[in-house]
Image (cartoon, rainbow, N blue to C red):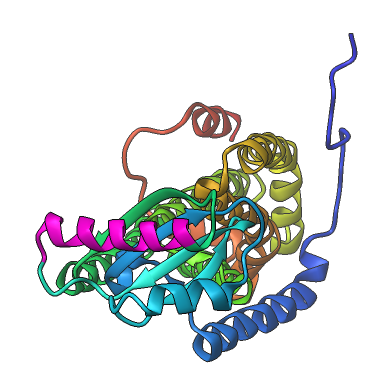
Amino acid sequence: MKLLKFVPDNTNIKFVALRHWAFALTAILTILAVGVTVHRGLNLGVDFVGGLMIEESFQSPPDLEKVRSTVDRLGVGESSLQQFGDPKTVSIRLPAPESSNEGATNAIVTKVQSALRAEFPGAKFSRYDAVSGKVSGELIQNGVLAVVLAIVGIAIFSWFRYEWQFGVSTFVAIVHDVLITLGFFAITRLEFDLNIVAAVLTIVGYSINDKMVIDDRIRENMRKYRKMEMKDLIDLSVNETLPRTVMTSVTVLLALASLLLFGGHVLRGFTAAMMLGIIVGTYSSVYVSSSLLITLGLTPQAIDRKPKAGPQSDAERVTERKR
């Protein structure tokens, strides 16, 4: 039986030759992502802004203005409405109750639910979330800190594991992936909550895993082909790892597509972020971070100046015996 191959044998794509186009596209997308995020902002969930979020399902797409007026008449604070997942489901945001106890929250939820059922027969209560302002502030701080520490820690590891050029290229690639994801959420207005922070951290982990495979092959080839031009060496390394990169990305995307279709609207934002992150992370690993090593001045001879640390891999021992 013939094996399925997404990438033919002896593939020789000139990735480095396209690096200037890739750098320009990356810069444009990053600037646009930052601009739209700053201009439009993120649709922050209750986790980050505090307050009370009530999710209500209707038998048919409701008139949002009618829903808003029904809720505002209850005197529970100014409401903010958004269709959630499908036109029949509406997310209603309200200020957090003055009393932080659960009884006060339940009273508001019951009040809203009763009013909507009276005005819209067949309306069903799905769920609610309540977060105080103090807790939401701490969640924002901890979420940002987690992402920043992950990016900086991975960049420092790459710096000490390989050369400083690897650390810088890793940092640039991961920041690019994270900013593009933020821009996507600013454009689509999908709710940005703690689930999306988890997705961003997962994207960072996936991106660095893909990049480390390519970086390891580059370092290995730097030991084997000391006289080879760096452009050719990077093209060789990326093409050698391309079947693994493509196969991994495709299989993960297939799993995420199933989750997007059958996982329900609660997981839709998380799944969309993951799918975008896989695509953008693969692109940045193949076209951006690897080619950036040339711009940063990395040469095959640089590996000779680096002291050996720790046990060698099998590939390195074979290379040493050949020399």
Q: Residue at x 44, y 77 (%)?
A: 80
- Residue 273: x, y in percent? 56, 56
Q: Residue at x 67, y 48 (%)?
A: 225
Total marks placed: 0
Is residue 266 among what the camera can see?
Answer: yes
Q: Is residue 314 above or below residue 75?
A: above
Q: Is residue 280 above or below residue 179?
A: above
Q: Is residue 55 above or below residue 36?
A: above
User: What secondary structure predominates along the stretch shown in magenta?
Assistant: helix
Q: Residue at x 49, y 83 (%)?
A: 41
Based on the displayed image, in which of its 4 quarters is residue 318 positioned?
Answer: top right
Is 120 covered by the magenta stretch? no
Dividing the image into 4 quarters, which one contains the C terminus? top right
Q: Is residue 223 left or right of residue 56?
A: right
- Residue 10: x, y in percent? 87, 37
Residue sitting farthest toward the top:
1
Dividing the image into 4 quarters, which one contains the N terminus? top right
Q: Which residues are magenta?
A: 100-118
Q: Which residue is more in the foreground, 149 or 193?
A: 193
Is 112 covered by the magenta stretch? yes
Is residue 179 among what the camera can see?
Answer: no
- Residue 3: x, y in percent? 84, 18
Q: Which residue is more in the foreground, 21 or 28?
A: 28
Based on the displayed image, in which of its 4 quarters is residue 190 positioned?
Answer: bottom right
- Residue 299: x, y in percent? 59, 64
